[in-house]
Amino acid sequence: MSSARVSRHARIRMMAAVATVCALSAAPLAPQAVAADTPPYTETYRPQFHFTPEKNWMNDPNGLVYYKGEYHLFYQYNPNGNTWGDMSWGHAVSKDLVHWEELPLALSHDDEEMVFSGSAVVDWDNTTGFGTKKNPPMVAIYTSAYKNGGKQAQSLAYSTDRGRTWTKYQGNPVIDIGSNNFRDPKVQWYAPTKSWLMTVSLSAEHKVQFYSSKNLKDWRLQSEFGPAGATGGVWECPDLFPLAVDGDENTIKWVLVVNINPGGIAGGSGSQYFIGDFDGKKFTADDKGTYTPPTGTVVQDFEGTNFGSWTTTGTAFGQGPATGAVDWQGAVTGFDGKGLANSFHGGDGATGTLTSPEFTVDSPYLNFKVGGGRHPHEAGTVMDRTPPEGTVLADFEGGTYGDWTATGDAFGSAPATGTLPDQGQVSGFLGDGLANTFLNGDASTGTLTSPEFTLDKKHINFLIGGGNHPADSGNPTAVELLVDGQVVRSSTGKDGEALNWASWDVGDLAGKKAQIRIVDNNSGGWGHLNVDHIMLSDTQAPRVSQETSVNLLVDGKVVRSATGADSESLDWASFDLRPYVGKKAQIQVVDMNSAGWGHVMADQFTAADKPAKSVVQRADWTDYGKDYYAAVSWENAPGGKRYMIGWMNNWDYGQSIPTSPWRSAQSVPREMALRTINGQTRLTSNPVGSLESLRQQHPAATASGVTVKSTSKPLIGPTAKGKALDIEATFSLKDADRFGLKVRTGAGGEETVIGYDATTQELYVDRTHSGAVEFNSTFPGVQTAPLKPKNGKVKLRILVDWSSVEVFGGNGEAVITDQIFPDPSSTGVEVFAEGGTATLNHMQAWQLKSIWR
């Protein structure tokens, strides 16, 4: 699995350490309401050709194996709810990797363990003794996540009826190294040594271990790989497999896939890979050489004894540049020369800004190094924490709840004074007290209700943090406004301990009597709330910045931003300045966060003609989108094919996507290959061929020789639209800066833009206006993938489903997978060009049939 998927980085004084706690960033949006009579698989956002369980939560694909004409897809599954928990193995089978039959639960959690991710093999020679040679057993190798103490170890289960029923091995676990971050075994038969090979992750150490066994029960460690490549988050779900380069069976290379969360190329979860050699014991990655950033003019290198003409506010940056780590900070690396800007003066609790003088933008790029906390800039936030004028209904100071009434055991007899035992660090409250329902952990429940008051101002403002369980869900964690005993307004947390302002417009309720009720009816993950400073005001309280970032300001507004990766190591980042050439700008380094990893570091600001690339950008990725994670491949597929599938979601917001009664889908299965692209060996992926069986007999739209100039226009044809489409398109570059297709266009300007940027030679997907995006601040945005044109042309394959797009560029070397949640009426397809002319040489678009009907 991965548990820690539910992980976030926390600061421990004197050292940087990783603390795994149940935390995902998510925002308050109730799941899409589903009418009681809505037939399964017809719900608003239900994918029509991607696998989803009929109901409940799903994440990582597990146990991918082919046996007796069936592709088995096991997956992380919560049989008891729509969010992560009670992890077990769900099960589905397919004969063609397209149509799926959901089967009963395969491996269930129990009182001792949850069943985390792993793999499955067919034990043809019955090396385990679990079956017979005539009826070889299917063996699942999974991670036991023990509930008592949190240890993770590798265990076995077996089936002798084609995976329909399973028995856990009495000798479990078969590998136990005493670690809480040791998971996701991928097992295969390694013929040269006639033994089983296990690839498994030491997640927090950014290492993969390789073990060997003759019987799947007794294992010997062979070697380790890592750290290498991207290491901004835990390493999970590794996979190792050989592929022929350019189809030449005499040239075999090995691919090691390592999924990472957070720290992916698009932010949050991602799937990286290494190409190299494997000798039966050790994987050796190909040497990619050292990286030299582009040269340029240094604007600020912090080598002086003070900040010069740069100005500070607050205390976080101290009196001048730091020479490395400051008091109580872990070792700082990656900066150039002797000095850097470091906001850890006074620890994570200190805040402040460091701002350059104004300058005229005269270079294409600004390159710099950044490190510290991963707290991105959020548009629309302010730096002033002062609440607006108004009447305070409750500030939870003074050690009592006053005349508020409590029920249950979540609130205790008095307000909390901050963080409670075993809770992540709470920040953002005012004064010394707050209502905090983590009193006895997430298991405690209760309510806290105000006396009646009169609504005599336009807004109710309050600070809120904690769990994201909306008021209309089965087990809410919510602040509610009651009028005449009915809930008329509600807000919930964002699955984070930091409090921030929420505001209700109550102008239409003026003069009415009301009550505030704080409800914690949730005993699962994030089953608590933090609330403070509830007030009536005629002014809406804006959300307060909690960022640790480097920003570019033009006309006083943030137009570019970069943040750290919860690491004390600085890495390169780059701002594209080309849209702002000739304009006045400032650089501002911002630390407005006082919780874990609440600091930022910066160095070596350099004006340059080309962008610098971070370690993450220099790594190799199976997919450049936001929603492709835990990618693993099938064992013993027919014809030696290597098919891969990934979880089509992201831990940044995965538990908050607006779907019900299911949550999460798998990607389409993809056929993997190694190809030489622009002189380099690259892992490529394309949709499995059998997907074309879903195409309607005739294309819904065709086009050829369509030239567009600085415009966007709908495709011609009565059926040139749809919610489930398979599009093949080839464009010729002319002089347009950007061009491509817009899909799911319609209501209120909704569109998902699938384009090519000729100036950067990048494929991109822009889902900023794709529909419902407000449930998490990291969801809207643009994802990019490097893609060079071939013979002046760009080839695209686009799969559009009811809640996703998967874009395959070129020969499958640039792939972007993104979820989208558009209005069902948004079904249009348009061709566009910006800044000049482009030609759509050829296009065919097919409506796709549903796999469920």
Image (tube, grey):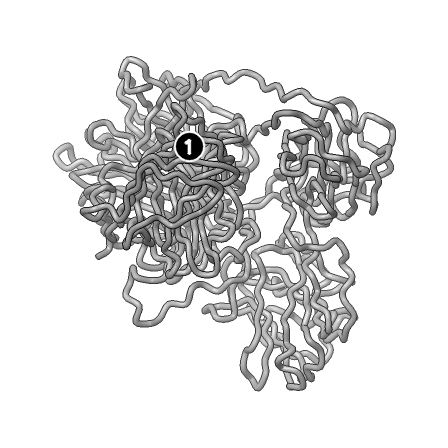
Residue 109 drawn at (x, y percent): 37, 52
477 vs 769: above or below: below
Residue 255 drawn at (x, y percent): 39, 25
Residue 603 in which image quadrant: top right
Residue 97 drawn at (x, y percent): 24, 42
* Label 1 SS: strand
In the picture, measured across the screen, residue 606 lies left or right of residue 813, that is right
The residue that mark 1 highlights is 814
Residue shown at the point (39%, 38%) measured from the top left:
707
Residue 644 vs residue 86, the one in the foreground: 644
Residue 202 in sight in this render: no
Residue 100 vs residue 457, the one in the foreground: 457
Residue shown at the point (37%, 30%) measured from the top left:
810
Residue shown at the point (76%, 28%) measured from the top left:
299
- Residue farthest to the left? 134
How many C-alpha atoms fall within 10 Å of the one at disc 1: few (<14), some, or many (≥20)? many
Tell me the kind of residue under disc 1: Ala
Residue 310 vs residue 476, the one in the foreground: 310
Residue 86 in which image quadrant: bottom left
Residue 608 in sight in this render: yes
